[in-house]
Amino acid sequence: MSGRRPRTAAVAESGGTIAPSKSQRAYRLLHDRIVDGTYSPGFRLVLDAIGRELDMSVVPVREAIRRLEAEGLVTFERNIGARVAEIDELEYHDTMETLSYVEGAAISLAAGLYSASDVAAARAINDEMRQSLADFDPVRFTALNEAFHRQLTDVCPNQVLGDVIDTCWKRLARLRQSTFSFVPNRAVPAIDEHDAILGLIEEGADPRRIELAVRAHRLATPDAYLHRTQPKP
Amino acid sequence: MSGRRPRTAAVAESGGTIAPSKSQRAYRLLHDRIVDGTYSPGFRLVLDAIGRELDMSVVPVREAIRRLEAEGLVTFERNIGARVAEIDELEYHDTMETLSYVEGAAISLAAGLYSASDVAAARAINDEMRQSLADFDPVRFTALNEAFHRQLTDVCPNQVLGDVIDTCWKRLARLRQSTFSFVPNRAVPAIDEHDAILGLIEEGADPRRIELAVRAHRLATPDAYLHRTQPKP
DNA sequence: ACTGAGTGGAAGATATACGATTTCGTGCAC
DNA sequence: GTGCACGAAATCGTATATCTTCCACTCAGT
């Protein structure tokens, strides 16, 4: 589900064949557990315990946590320790808002670069989303949703922008397990908007129009969530 | 020159009074030296040497470098070591392009929030820029330019967006010292465009119009940029 | 009971030590 | 003269050890 092209700024995962370093292993494990919800927000990450579990000393674990810290997945307090970053409503909103802008930018920049197969692949994913909705499978729906968006943003040649998008997704990943990641009344409109976006791409619409469509599409979700929670004053 | 408000995702610098940890000190030193050009791109960062210079062991230095790595300021190869990240023409362009989008987003989101004093402060900075140009002081000009942009983007309440902007600035900081950071034929138009942006803000123009103005303003610079080879140590 | 100083344990921060990997120079064979 | 092999130096990677800091708990004293 990662990008199709290499990312410069993302820290290199080192060559495939050779054994990864212990700090890389620690990073990968912690990252995955945070993303898949094994460690939920607020979970205390005790260096020693993690080191013992992974059969390594605390040093590589510390480095892994430093990296996760820089990515915003964990918070760290001096002499206190690390814990999985909480994500509050405000940060959720800010991240979604940011994503709406950068995805809009990425997809509009890629507007002229989509091949027929790119669009077909995206459309296939969207069809699967429709199916998953019929099957009442919200987990699958959410995963497909990310796949759809990545399918489109990955075509954008601007790698820095791609990294920003990655980071935003990582932040959102933390709450994928939690209740408010799936906003039921957004599911059907989202699928329709996906189709509309693909339509705009296919007909070679003005990139700016595509940008605004993508932006509005994503921005609609946090708005729907906020409205569900509390009517705006 | 940093933001006026605290940044969530940016790693906490810990309270002001107490002594910073060694890894924080190491981070700060390396970061500053990379930004101010003491360590130019490609410079080899040897853990042991840095540790000895800072009178600490390599462990805190390693953690500092991990953080710099995650921020994209240094590259790291297993069993080889760290060096200050090179910035090539493509990355420069991508960063500027990204910045043009996210700054446009931030300023348009802040459009309705600027106080008269905010605008006055920005205008004062722009006037100083005009003066520094008359004095033929490109270093000062570049610093003021960043100050101007921060003055406007810092009003945006979206902290995630603010963090993205910070990261982009940090990347650009690496080449601030080098000759190509200042594009002479962009100086006068830039000042005029700044004024135009302030005018749009003051007259309460449509945020989308402001967004496009900011975007166009920044995008104009990379277009005027000429590639030059960087000396390697 | 309430407050606050004292105290012990848990966990983080850092130093040191040693093993592993890469790099680079040197010398020998061809 | 060229190229390969070997080895030493440099540097990274990790484990272990030690010191510090924080936190929770206890136990006077009021």
Image (cartoon, coloured by chain):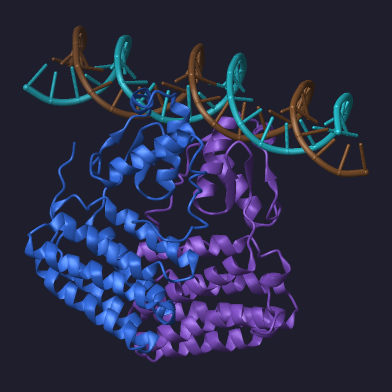
Chain colours: A purple, B blue, C brown, D cyan
Q: Residue A192 location, x and y as percent?
A: 58, 89
Q: Nearer the viewer, residue A202 or A187?
A: A187
User: Which image quarter holds the N terminus of chain A?
Assistant: bottom right
Q: Residue B200 location, x and y as percent?
A: 30, 85
| Residue at image location 63% in from the left, 79% down from the top | A129
| Residue at image location 36% in from the left, 81% down from the top | A111
Position of residue D19 relative to residue A168, above or below, is above
Q: Residue B109 location, x and y as percent?
A: 44, 78
Position of residue B128 relative to residue A37, above or below, is below
Badge count: 0
Q: Residue B87 location, x and y as percent?
A: 26, 52
| Residue at image location 58% in from the left, 45% down from the top | A76
User: Which image quarter holds the C terminus of chain A?
Assistant: bottom right
In the picture, measured across the screen, residue D23 lies left or right of residue B164, that is: right
| Residue at image location 59% in from the left, 85% down from the top | A191
In the picture, measured across the screen, residue D2 lies left or right of residue D17, that is: left
Residue A4 seen in the current view? no
Position of residue A34 relative to residue A138, above or below, is above
In the picture, measured across the screen, residue A160 lies left or right of residue A21, that is: left
Q: Quadrant of residue B120?
A: bottom left
Residue B233 seen in the current view? yes
Position of residue B35 relative to residue A224, above or below, is above
Q: Nearer the viewer, residue A59 or B164?
A: B164
